Image (cartoon, rainbow, N blue to C red):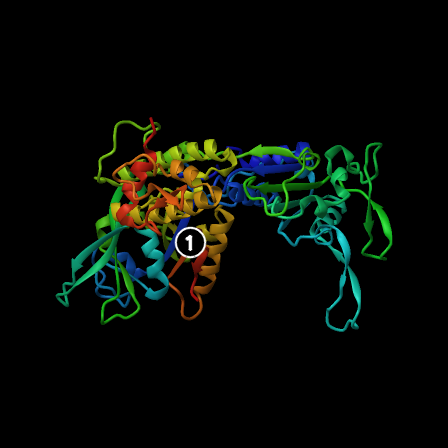
Amino acid sequence: MSSSGTNIVRVFLFRIDDGDRRKFIAKANDTDSGGGPRDLRIRPEDEFWPFFERLLSGRETVSRPRTGGTTEILVDEIRCKDGSGEERSRIEIWPQQNNRPNECRIAKVYQWQADHLIQNDPNGGHSVLMLFQQADGIIRLFFTTETVLRTGKWDPTVKAFANEWLDKTSVHPRPKSAFLDLKTKERYTGG
Amino acid sequence: MASAKEILELLEARRNVLLAGPPGTGKSMLLSEVANLFANRGSGSTPRYDPDAEIPIPPSETTSLPGDIGTARNRKVFRSVLHQSSKYRDFLTGMMPDVRAGKPAGSFRITEGVLYRASEYAKAPDSAALLIIDEINRGPTVQVFGGSIVAMEAEKRLGTDGNPTKNTQYFDLLNPDDGELIEYAFPTKLYILAAMNQADVSVEPLDVAFLRRWAPINLEPSVKVLRDHFDLPAAPSGDLPSTPATTEDVFEAAVRAFEAVNRRIALGRAPEFRIGHGVLMASDGKPNSIPESLAHFATCWRLIKTHIDEAFFGDVRGMAIVLNADQGIATNPFSLEETTFGDAPRAQINGPATLSTDVIYGLMLALAHQAD
């Protein structure tokens, strides 16, 4: 069989704007990027949440600091190459809050201590965060740029998906995120 | 297990390849992989992570396709599934009423069946066609292929230049262009890949003369694939607890039950009636908790139970042996009852109409039990 642990089953892309960069060091509450100083905001939740439920295998019930209630969040481990080593971090994705309908959040990204890995696009394009999942469930974090996504030697399926999303990021409503699920054949690149 | 690349190499050598195996042994997956390789010029269709590459998901390494398949600039995959109503005209050519818009009532036309279309495509310069036929034994196969059976053989095709060789075999065909009967032969770059489950025979078994035109590949149920999938040790060791303490206990019970049941099916009915490993494999990884595992295997074993019911229909004692219902195992929800119908002895299997998560682990332990 050709199936193996290195086959890719899911890909998630997120455009890192200036405000988002500061979330990687927990200093982003001065911008319109929103989501507090630590969280990347993902919209629309009704598109992304089912995908995240497939991407992350863990579930935890946590308290809502603001409302006092509890909610179930998605958790898992991500792996990221840093130099010659590989760092492992916890990823949390929180569902929408009452004051931010249809928006979920990748929370506490500063804990990844990955701000130094964010890539600047030499041609003025976007910086991009990529999560991709292997068939064995391992999730990997990778930072890249619009130029690399457009011109680099990527798998043609991933490249076509990324370009479709990048083409939409320059026109309203400028989708910040996209996903591709090769298992369910679902994709979202901005509606 | 055969790989897609190996099948392509066999197709190149023999032109006609037949995959045979019980349900769940990976036939459909292999058909798709071969089709993707054939159509995509050898590029793998599944993105892969390369930890050593600068781009983490680079293009898959191009597979060099063998022989004439590799040299064809144009390649196209045609697909078909045989069924009880399949006809010669659906595969080659034939007359059928023409009910298309604008056609006067009572009109007829000549069909261009999928094998004819694939053959015509492969006759074009620099072209190769792959025809995939799933469930090839689910219809009147020999009638569907008609006189083309002999002409299918690799050495009886047209030459690589499109001209006949001394071995080229022709058969009569209704020409779609003018309705005349013509002598027709298959091109050399027509490849036919078929799949079947020998236990599924809807109309008639395939005859030997038909089967010898194909290079066979037999796919077997694999316990190793299951053990790899569920991250279990290569071989079972020790007894399992009466209630599962971990998901691995549930996985182990399921795999042991699978192996034991398949052994009994092969003895009681025939190896072709065994269940493939794919039946137990979740489409999205493996279950994460004991409740998820029990729910997953309850669904799987309901499917397997239906298969056993069908394979042993009318053979109560055979079914009882497969289910270990005659062994008096406490955890088995199924039991064999000896009774009478008037003065005649009868046997019946008592048990739940459907398998729930409450009984599935006990059932799997009971199924895994080897009769002394």
Give the vertical position of A93 relative to B325 (above or below): below
Mark 1 sits on what residue?
Answer: A181
Q: Callout 1 environment at 10 Å: few (<14), some (14 to 19), or many (20+)?
A: some
How many callouts does the rendering have?
1
* B259 horizontally vs B22: left or right: left
Look at 43% across and 61% down and name the residue there. Answer: A189
Give the vertical position of A169 relative to B47 (above or below): below
Chain ID, mark 1: A
Q: Is residue B56 visible?
A: no
* B228 horizontally vs B9: left or right: left
Residue A185 percent across, percent down from the top left: 46, 55
Look at 21% across and 50% down and name the residue there. Answer: A111
Residue B318 percent across, percent down from the top left: 43, 37
* B168 horizontally vs A59: left or right: right
Query: Which amino acid does the dot numbered 1 rest on?
Result: Asp
- Dot 1: element: strand
Q: Is residue B323 visible?
A: yes
Res A174 quadrant in image: bottom left
Residue A96 percent across, percent down from the top left: 26, 66
Look at 39% across and 65% down and name the residue there. Answer: A175
